[in-house]
Amino acid sequence: MARPRAFEEAEVLQKALDTFWRRGYSATSVEDLVAGTGLNRASLYATFGDKHQLFIRALGHYQRQSCQTLTALTADPNAGPLAHLRQILELTLSLALADDQQKGCFMVNATAELAPHDTEAQALVRQNQQFMENLLVGLLRQGQERGEVNRRAAPQAQARLLVSILNGMRVLAKANPDPQQLRDVVDTVLLALT
């Protein structure tokens, strides 16, 4: 009979995610992951495979959390589409300003570090971008139908621009977490949408 695991897999994934997030994929050693997760090397390998597979699992974990957060944020039927778009921008702003270690967005970091040459990371990045784009297209279409969002651009094009802006805000905050600069971005985007 197999011995039950003495740890919660989701907790270990979160700890691994935090370790990768602070250091980046390349700079994180297996020793860093052992220290960060509290597991010994054998348990880490037996459960998650190698460092790369653990990173991919952590990136998937982050993606699921982000998608759940955004889905819940935009689920209120009493708020209009423009209000939901504002909430997404405000959430990005607040996450960027609360990031006192200037780690940025884990998905954006993975995009820059791994996606160009790692097919598994690239697939998760693309899934995440597609989720964001689809969510935003839906909100923008509703906003146009209700007269809350201008009709000068197609929702698909507007959504792609918004995904770029949201990612850019997180990168900008890594280099210069100036609240007024980020607030200007949010206000200007909302002004351009109406």
Image (cartoon, rainbow, N blue to C red):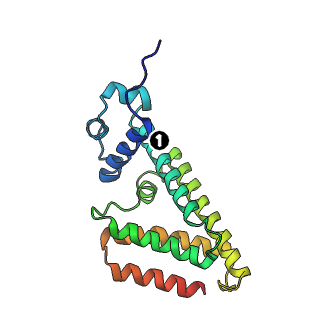
At which x and y percent is residue 107?
45, 56
Q: Is residue 116 above or below residue 53?
A: below
How crowded is the residue under tag 1: few (<14 C-alpha within 10 Å), some, or many (20+)? some
Q: Is residue 25 above or below residue 165?
A: above
Residue 182 in view: yes
Which residue is outermost to the front?
Answer: 78
Residue 118 in view: no
At which x and y percent is residue 139?
65, 72
Q: Is residue 58 above or below residue 181?
A: above
Mark 1 — residue? 57
Q: Amino acid at mark 1?
A: Arg
At which x and y percent is residue 87?
51, 73
* Secondary structure under the numbered disc 1 in the rendered image: helix
Dividing the picture into quadrants, the one containing residue 50 is: top left
Residue visible at 31% across and 73% down in the picture: 177
Left or right, 64 with respect to 173, comes to: right
Q: Is residue 85 above or below residue 63?
A: below
Residue visible at 29% across and 40% down in the picture: 29
Residue visible at 61% across and 75% down in the picture: 79
Which residue is outermost to the right?
Answer: 145
